[in-house]
């Protein structure tokens, strides 16, 4: 494997959800420069793409750091191929195989492959993602062993070292709220509440105490549960 120059730049996979927003703040406190990449894959909650530039600007304002370039990659062809309730009008429910209907086959594998190719051309060797196996809703591509295997595969395939950082991997949603507070205090928490988007239905009309969402889909339920637990027991 060829040696690559040590990069002090990280590329964050930014969807505009709570997790990736927190990871963006985390990266800004640890790297000299942070770039971001997003993906348009036909997601039913495409409103997240609208929220991305808002989050980039506001999070940088709360935690400081140097924000670099952003790119959104068109993966709608992949989204159509890997059709799920997250990329169609199908009901959001559990499938017979035990996975939620929102599971998009290979999504994180595709995202990391595209992100690594982009990072390689820009001389960046660190990718940051918000994957979490504590509250991962049964998605197999969020597991630690999957991410470790992907890191090795990308490094071999590019013949250059690629590091995948997943700071939320072993955190609950309550602990993720706590991390956001640790990184940027009430200001960062308020930014994530107001401007990040998690709801599978793309609901930016109904404002809950933890942010906007339908308050009924699995993503909203998980985010709300974490918020309540943090407020009840972990908030300083």
Image (cartoon, helix red, strand yellow):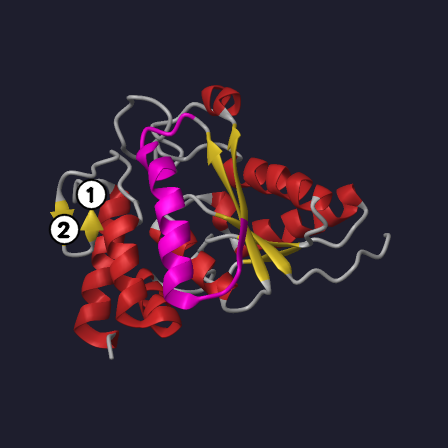
**Element at badge 1?**
loop
Q: Are marks 1 and 2 in contact (CB under 8 Å)?
A: yes
Q: Is residue 150 left or right of residue 15?
A: right
Q: Which residue is located at x 35 percent, y 30 percent?
A: 86
Q: Main secondary structure of the magenta part?
A: helix
Q: Nearer the viewer, residue 56 or 210?
A: 56
Q: Position of residue 142 (x, y in %)?
A: 49, 49
Is residue 126 visible in the rendered image? The answer is: yes
In the rendered image, which quarter contains the C terminus? bottom left
Q: Nearer the viewer, residue 170 or 9?
A: 9
Disc on the earlier residue, 1 or 2:
2
Q: Is residue 55 magenta?
A: yes
Q: Could you classify mark 2 by the number of other residues whose Cα lies within 10 Å: few (under 14), some (14-19), or many (20 or more)? A: some
Q: Which residue is mark 1?
A: 213
Q: Nearer the viewer, residue 114 or 149?
A: 114
Q: Residue furthest right?
A: 2
Q: Which residue is located at x 35 percent, y 66 percent?
A: 180
**Where is 227 relative to 102, above or below?**
below
Q: Which residue is located at x 17 percent, y 41 percent?
A: 216
Q: Which residue is located at x 17 percent, y 72 percent?
A: 232
Q: Could you classify mark 1 by the number of other residues whose Cα lies within 10 Å: few (under 14), some (14-19), or many (20 or more)? A: many
Q: Which residue is mark 2?
A: 208
Q: Which residues are magenta?
A: 42-68
Count of all numbered marks drawn on residues in the image: 2
Q: Position of residue 224 (x, y in %)?
A: 21, 55
The quadrant in which residue 218 appears is: top left
């Amino acid at each position: 494997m060829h040696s690559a120059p040590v990069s002090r730049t990280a590329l964050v996979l930014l969807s505009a959800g709570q997790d990736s927003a927190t990871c963006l703040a985390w990266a800004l406190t640890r790297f000299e420069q942070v770039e971001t990449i997003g993906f348009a894959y036909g997601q039913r909650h495409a409103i997240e793409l609208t929220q991305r530039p808002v989050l980039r600007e506001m999070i940088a304002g709360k935690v400081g750091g140097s924000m670099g370039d952003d790119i959104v990659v068109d993966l709608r062809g992949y989204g159509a191929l890997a059709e799920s309730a997250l990329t169609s009008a199908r009901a959001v429910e559990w499938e017979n195989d035990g996975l939620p209907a929102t599971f998009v086959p290979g999504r994180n594998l595709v995202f990391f492959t595209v992100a690594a190719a982009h990072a390689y051309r820009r001389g960046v060797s660190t990718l940051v993602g918000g994957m979490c196996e504590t509250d991962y809703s049964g998605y197999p591509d969020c597991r630690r062993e999957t991410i470790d295997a992907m890191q090795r595969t990308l490094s071999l395939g590019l013949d250059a070292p690629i590091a995948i950082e997943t700071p939320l991997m072993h955190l609950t949603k309550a602990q993720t709220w706590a991390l956001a507070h640790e990184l940027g205090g009430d200001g960062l928490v308020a930014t994530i509440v107001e401007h990040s988007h998690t709801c599978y239905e793309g609901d930016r009309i109904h404002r809950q105490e933890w942010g906007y969402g339908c308050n009924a889909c699995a993503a909203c339920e998980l985010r709300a549960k974490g918020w309540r637990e943090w407020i009840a027991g972990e908030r300083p």
